[in-house]
Image: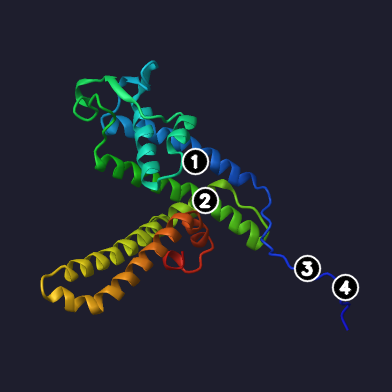
Amino acid sequence: MDDLGARVRTRITVPRVDFDLSALVVAMIGWFAYQVSWRLLAPALGYAAEYGVQINDTATGRIQGFQLLRRAFAERVLNLVRLPHLDSLLDQLGWAQVDVVAAGPSAAELMPASGVVIPWWHHAVVALVLLVLWSIVGGAIARVHAVRIARDRSISWDDGFAFSLSNLRAFVQAPLFVLLAALLFFALDAAAGAAIAIPWAGAILQIALQPLALLAGLVVTIIVLGGVFGFPLLQSAIAVERGGTLDA
């Protein structure tokens, strides 16, 4: 008979990840590639000049084109996320919104005096480049630690990059698949709403379509939340070579 006074211990165990020098090397190379990417993207998108900026009523200064592009992209992403105390967070990160005081002739129409305005397709190009870079670097780091946990041995940093490059399609497809799935159910939700708005027939269609629209909205919410918070785990799922993109 068990001792009634004995304390039952329950705990959640997680795999212990040892320090791996190869992963550190991959991270350092990735950080260098991240900085270089902004300096290559800026002139490619027309932000190669140095611009005069005004951060507030008293502070003015100069800013490089890649810094302006990176700051505007970060502001756009954080504005979409809608974090609490966003203005204070941007100030602490040094990404406070700036107003362009003097700009080159090519940037006059892109960045009017009221603030930094960057076309949506510039943001799309930056997001795609960062997604590919994240897939290569994150996939290599995930592969190094996956081999360390599964086989208790280390692989070199170039083997990690070789794996992520050979599986780059799967690494890029995984988050795009989540995005397309969310857009699909969002489109179904919008179509149901449009059908309900049809005069006369909408009231009849609402009986069947409204529950389906609520279900589609719930699915969209689950997919979006899972995609945002589970995004770093996509590379880990692919790195173990099980089900590829679908498993991720």
Tell me the tag on residue 9: 3
| Numbered circles on residues, count | 4
Tell me the tag on residue 30: 1
Task: Give the structural element (helix, strand or loop) at label 3.
Answer: loop
Circle 1 Cα neighbour tier, 10 Å, few/some/many (<14 / 14–19 / ≥20)? some
- Asked if the residue at tag 2 contacts the one at tag 1, i.e. Cβ–Cβ closer than 8 Å, the answer is yes
Structural distance between the alpha carbons of marks 4 and 3: 12 Å
Q: Residue at x 26, y 30 (%)?
A: 46
Residue 162 pos. (x, y %): 49, 51
Residue 185 pos. (x, y %): 30, 67
Amino acid at the residue labelled 4: Gly
Q: Which mark sits nearer the N-terminus, 1 or 4?
A: 4
**Which of the two marks, 2 or 3, is nearer to us in this view?**
3
Tell me the tag on residue 5: 4
**Which of the two marks, 4 or 2, is nearer to us in this view?**
4
Q: Which mark sits nearer the N-terminus, 1 or 3?
A: 3
Quadrant in which residue 11 is drawn? bottom right
In the depicted structure, whether residue 187 falls above or below residue 70: below
Circle 4 Cα neighbour tier, 10 Å, few/some/many (<14 / 14–19 / ≥20)? few
Quadrant position of the N terminus in the picture = bottom right
Residue pushed farthest bottom?
A: 1
Q: Residue at x 67, y 60 (%)?
A: 15
Q: Which mark sits nearer the N-terminus, 1 or 2?
A: 1
Structural distance between the alpha carbons of marks 2 and 3: 37 Å
